[in-house]
Image: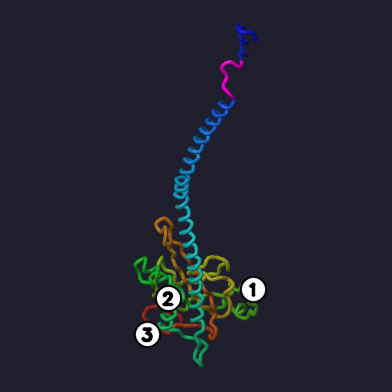
């Protein structure tokens, strides 16, 4: 090119344009800034996880405690039910196995026999003593245990001579109370079988009462009947949950005698012998 000749101008797109390396550095710096900002937000979110867990635990803990305490009370109730049933059957076995003297078919029990079998409850159902202490009462005031001897009498000769015990014999027999324990504690109301009230037949699966007997128990002979009732009160939540009555009855025929009667000698009032026996 000759000296003094004019310089060829650059294209407009190239005038003032930054080098490619400068643009790359700027993009990298922007990316780092964005990553740093996101990292700070993620770290803050992670730091907040502890607070979220604490809130969740605070919400779930009461439910977990409720389930735990309710579970322990359900187990205690089931155990109490089994023990009440055990008390009824064990005492009925002790009384029904009384042996009559050689000259009679009628066995006798006295006040000492009744007290001995009654006190066996402490071995069979020790929870009753712990529960009584919590309620501020004596253990024997915390459970209702009632004894009765029932004798069946045929209404007529046809009933008396009927050998078929596989049918319902309740229409043929009257059930009379021979003796009953009127002197034991009666928490929750009288639960002993009264002397002057006939025992009426009812369905075998009906709830037992102090004046009824299952139809299947009617027939020639007699029965030893033990009625046990216990009011189960939960240890936790007793102010909100009412007491639940657990009642079980055992019906047992005398094993070695035709009837188990009561000997009133040295009777301290634990039992009453009914009129006519």
Q: Quadrant of the N terminus?
A: top right
Left or right: 275, with 164 as reference point: left
Residue at 44% across, 72% down: 192
Q: Secondary structure at mark 1?
A: loop
Q: Which mark is residue 167?
A: 1
Residue at 64% across, 8% down: 2
Q: Which mark is residue 120?
A: none
Instruction: Classify 28 as above or below 108.
Output: above
Q: Are marks 1 and 3 in contact (CB under 8 Å)?
A: no
Left or right: 217, with 130 as reference point: right
Tell me which numbered mark, 1 or 3, is placed earlier along the sequence.
1
Residue that mark 2 sits on: 122
Residue 137: x and y in percent read: 35, 69
Tell me which numbered mark, 2 or 3, is placed earlier along the sequence.
2
Marks 2 and 3, how far apart at CA: 24 Å
Residue 187: x and y in percent read: 40, 67
Q: Secondary structure at mark 2?
A: helix
Pick whichever, 9 or 174, lies toward us. 9
Residue 225: x and y in percent read: 50, 75
Asked if one can make out residue 81 in the rendered structure from this viewpoint, the answer is yes
Q: Which mark is residue 266?
A: 3
């Amino acid at each position: 090119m000759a000296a003094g000749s004019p310089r060829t101008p650059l294209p407009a797109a190239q005038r003032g344009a930054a080098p490619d390396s400068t643009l790359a550095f700027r993009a990298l710096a922007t990316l780092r800034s964005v990553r740093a900002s996101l990292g700070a937000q993620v770290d803050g979110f992670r730091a907040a996880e502890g607070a979220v867990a604490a809130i969740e635990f605070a919400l779930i803990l009461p439910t977990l405690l409720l389930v735990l305490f309710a579970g322990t009370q359900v187990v205690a109730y089931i155990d109490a039910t089994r023990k009440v049933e055990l008390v009824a059957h064990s005492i009925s076995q002790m009384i029904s196995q009384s042996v009559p003297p050689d000259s009679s078919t009628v066995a006798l029990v006295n006040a000492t026999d009744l007290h001995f079998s009654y006190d066996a409850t402490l071995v069979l159902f020790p929870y009753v003593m712990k529960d009584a202490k919590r309620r501020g009462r004596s253990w024997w005031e915390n459970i209702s245990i009632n004894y009765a001897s029932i004798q069946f009498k045929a209404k007529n000769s046809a009933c008396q001579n009927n050998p078929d015990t596989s049918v319902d014999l309740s229409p043929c027999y009257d059930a009379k109370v021979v003796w009953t324990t009127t002197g034991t504690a009666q928490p929750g109301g009288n639960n002993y079988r009264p002397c002057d009230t006939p025992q009426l037949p009812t369905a075998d699966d009906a709830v037992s009462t102090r004046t009824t007997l299952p139809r299947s128990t009617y027939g020639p002979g007699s029965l030893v009947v033990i009625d046990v009732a216990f009011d189960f009160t939960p240890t936790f939540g007793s102010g909100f949950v009412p007491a639940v009555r657990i009642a079980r009855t055992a019906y047992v025929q005398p094993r070695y005698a035709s009837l188990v009667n009561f000997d009133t000698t040295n009777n301290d009032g634990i039992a009453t012998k009914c009129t006519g026996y």
